[in-house]
Image (tube, rainbow, N blue to C red):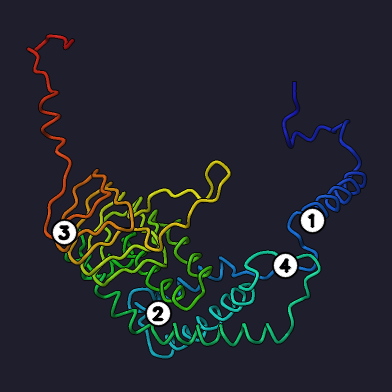
Amino acid sequence: MSRQPGSGQPEADCKDIGVRATELATTAASVAQRVAERARLVLRAPRLPSPDRVAEAASLVRRLIFPEVWTDEAPVAASVEAMVHHLYELLVDVLAAEHLAQPGRGHLAPGAAPVHARAEQLARCRAHETALSLIDELPGLRDMAETDLQAALDGDPAARSRAEVVLCYPGFHAVLSYRVAHLLWLAGAHLTARLMTELAHARTGIDLHPGATIGPAFFIDHGTGVVVGETAHVGRRVRLYQGVTLGARSVPKVRDGEPQPEPPAKRHPTLEDDVVVYANATLLGGDVVIGRGAIIGGNTWVTASVPPGARLRVDVAARVADAVVMVPDGAQPE
C-alpha cells in the first residue's frame, strides 16, 4: 500500500538532500550546455519584445482611447497625461528590442560581434520616433474606433450602451487591438504588431492580421473563429459573423523536394463597402472580390468573385425538404 503524501512517515528510499542537490546541479549544467548549443547562444540571443509589456501597452492604449470607460474614476487631463508618459516608456522598450533584433531576426551567428552601444542607441532613437508617432495618432484612433463602436450599436439589437460594447464585445476588442497594431505594422514593427493582435486572438478567438487593410465602421458580431489574413482588403461598413474566414489558398513552399514559386502578393480576398458575410462562410484567394453591398450566406465556400449587390447562399432548405420522410404517429421510420 503506497504512502500518501504528507503522512509524516519516513521515506526510506529518499536520497540525501545534499546528494540530490549535486545531481541537480550536474543535470542543469548539462542541459544548459545542450540547450545553448541548439539555440546558438555563443554570445547572446537578441533581446526581443516582451509579450507581457506588449499586453500592458495594448491595455493602456485602450484606456487612453476611451478613458471615460476604462478608468475607475472620472478622468482628468493630469491622469491621461500620466498614462501617455507610461505608454511611451512601454512602447520604447518593446520597439527598441524589436528594432535591435531586426537585422538578424533570429539567433546571432556563432562568433558574431556583440551589439555595440551605437546600434542600441540607433534602435532606441527609432523606437522613440515610432512611439511618439503612435501616441500622436491616438486621437485619430479614437475617431476610427468611434465608427466601429457605432457600427456595433447599429448592427446588434442586443447592444444597450457604448460602455457595454467597449467592455464586453470581443469583436470590438479585437478590432481596436488591430487598429493599433496596424499602425505598428506600417511603421515596420512587425513582431510587436503580431504580438498585439495575437494577444487579442487568444482572448477573443478572433484572428485579425495586423497587415490587413480594414476600413471604418467594421463590425464583427459574436466573432469566435473569425480569420482575416494579411493581404485582405475590407471596405467601409462591413459586417462579419462568427466563423468567417478571409483566407488564402494553400500554396506549399516545397513539393516533392522542389521549391515552389512564390505565392502572389495578394493572397486574401477583397470585400468592398457594405458587404455582409454570415456565419462560417469561407472566402479564399487574393483574386476574389466581393462587390459592394453583396451578402454572403452562412456556410458558403467562395473562391470566385461575387458581383455588387448579389445574394449568395447555399439552399439547404430545399435539400432538407426532399429528405424529410413523414411517418404516422407511433410508427417507426425505416
Res 69 → quadrant: bottom left
* Residue located 26% across and 45% down the image: 301
Q: Is residue 119 above or below residue 243?
A: below
- Marks 3 and 1: CB-CB under 8 Å? no
Q: CA distance from mark 4 to mark 3?
A: 54 Å
Label 3's element? loop
Q: CA distance from mark 3 to mark 2?
A: 27 Å
For label 1, count other residues whose C-alpha is less than 10 Å away and answer few (under 14), some (14-19) or many (20+).
few
Label 1's element? helix
- Whichever of labels 4 and 3 marks the residue nearer the N terminus, that label is 4
Q: CA distance from mark 3 to mark 1?
A: 58 Å
Look at the image and tell me in which quarter the N terminus lies: top right
Mark in the foreground, 3 or 1: 1
- Marks 1 and 2: CB-CB under 8 Å? no
* Residue located 78% across and 57% down the image: 36
The amino acid marked with disc number 4 is Leu
Q: CA distance from mark 2 to mark 4?
A: 37 Å
Q: Position of residue 23 (x, y in %)?
A: 89, 45
Label 4's element? loop
Q: Position of residue 123 (x, y in %)?
A: 62, 82
For label 3, count other residues whose C-alpha is less than 10 Å away and answer few (under 14), some (14-19) or many (20+).
few
Q: Is residue 311 above or below residue 213?
A: above
Q: Position of residue 88 (x, y in %)?
A: 52, 83
Q: Which residue is mark 1?
A: 37
Q: Is residue 155 visible?
A: no
Q: Which residue is mark 4?
A: 108
Q: Which residue is mark 2?
A: 64
The amino acid marked with disc number 1 is Glu
Q: Which residue is mark 3?
A: 157
Q: Is residue 82 visible?
A: yes
Mark in the foreground, 1 or 2: 1
Nearest the eye: 310 or 159: 310
